[in-house]
Image (spheres, helix red, strand yellow):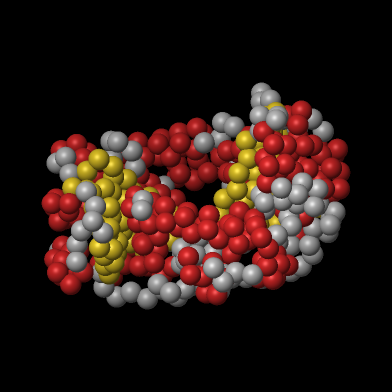
Amino acid sequence: MYQKHIVNNKLSVILAPIEHTETVTVLIMVKAGSKYETKDINGMSHFLEHMFFKGTIKRPSSTIITETLDRVGGEYNAFTGKEYTGYYAKVAAKHLDLALDVVSDIFLHSLIDVQEIEKEKGVIAEEINMFYDTPMRYIGDLWESLLYGDQPAGWDIAGTKEIIQTFKRENFIKYLNERYVDSNTVVFVSGKIQNTDELLNQIKVYFADIRSGEYINKLSVTEKQNSPQILIHNKKTDQTHIMLGFRAYDIWHKDKYALKLLSIILGGGMSSRLFEEIREKRGLTYYIHTENEHHTDTGFLATNAGIKNEKIYDAIEAIVQEHNNILNNGIHKNELYKAKEYVKGKLLLSLETSEQIASYLALQEILKSEIILPDAYCQIIDNVTIDDIMRVAHDVFQKSKLNLALIGPFEKSIHENQFLEILNS
């Protein structure tokens, strides 16, 4: 499915030829996200992502950059996470050279112009305002703030409006020189690849002047909790948004696959336990789903829902009760079978296009330097037993790991004890 190469000394390159496609995706990922920041530059990774589209030596304006790919119908964007940042372009296969040219150009030769920095501060401030005004989106930031507090794992990826106003050009250049280096970067090309040797030579040329440097690890995460914790964000809303769940496993943990299946049984899909009980039977919510997330040093399982304000206590109580039902009564073999087929089916659906395959390979390589192919992943899922699920449920579903983040018209001083009473039930 893929080939891995090292070029120009330390730059990793992964090529994934795909038959029966006429497109190709170029994706560059670097280990540089908000977990790699210090407090004074929180938001730098995300801000830098914006700056890469503001002009290069070769293409000195954002218009030139975007028009170059627009005129061939290309799709392009960038994204920033807790532990990585990525830049990509997807084009018709005949324009592969153009995609390589543009993506490598913004990655290596961005101007980071002082005037553009000052203009973009306003843009990002409005982006942060948009997050704050979107409870369905903002609840995730509050959730991680509750779990990890004032350390990189608990900070918003976009930073704060106050901190980003302090950024100077020298901050960006320092960060580039430290993080955007060959040993910290992976180039992915997936799709219709005619000649891999020729493509590797092209990549060597386009990345000939990549910055050289050694990988610098992020700070360790500290986790301390002995009892249920609550974070209430008081806001006048017509619907209360919550994340309710537990600290769990990082990306290296052997039981992360069993945890994945447990999350599907609990709240994955429209036939899951929570969807059936809380939406279909009780009519308390429009959306509800359970997710589990793994980083290299943290992980969690949490249920996300939007609930009628006046029914918030009933909904939280019902979610907690479903945790207890699993612990006390177990799961049925049919539930496990359905969850396995759900996970495998979703995986295959997510690998239909060149950009999806690039993303699948990239996230594994950038986080673990190890790639599990789809067939092997499906086999691991098939090997999970009911005993595995129950062992994980008893390990994770503990009051000492339970947390609730909430956005809605509730005062902490008035309502916190009522929420805690439910969590401890």
Q: Quadrant of the C terminus?
A: bottom left
Q: Is residue 119 above or below residue 64?
A: below
> Is 183 left, or right, of 139 in this rendering?
right
User: Looking at the image, which is closer to me, 151 or 167?
Assistant: 167
From where the camera sits, is residue 182 visible?
Answer: yes
Q: Quadrant of the N terminus?
A: top right
Q: Position of residue 108 (x, y in %)?
A: 76, 55
Q: Position of residue 100 (x, y in %)?
A: 76, 42
Q: Residue at the location (38% across, 46% down)?
A: 261
Image quadrant where residue 74 sits:
top right
Q: Position of residue 225 (x, y in %)?
A: 33, 74
Q: Is residue 157 above or below residue 238?
A: below
Tally of numbered tags: 0
User: Looking at the image, which is closer to me, 187 or 136?
Assistant: 136
Q: Residue at the location (17% across, 51% down)?
A: 309
Q: Position of residue 396 (x, y in %)?
A: 33, 61
> Is 79 left, or right, of 187 in this rendering?
left
Q: Residue at the location (47% across, 55% down)?
A: 126
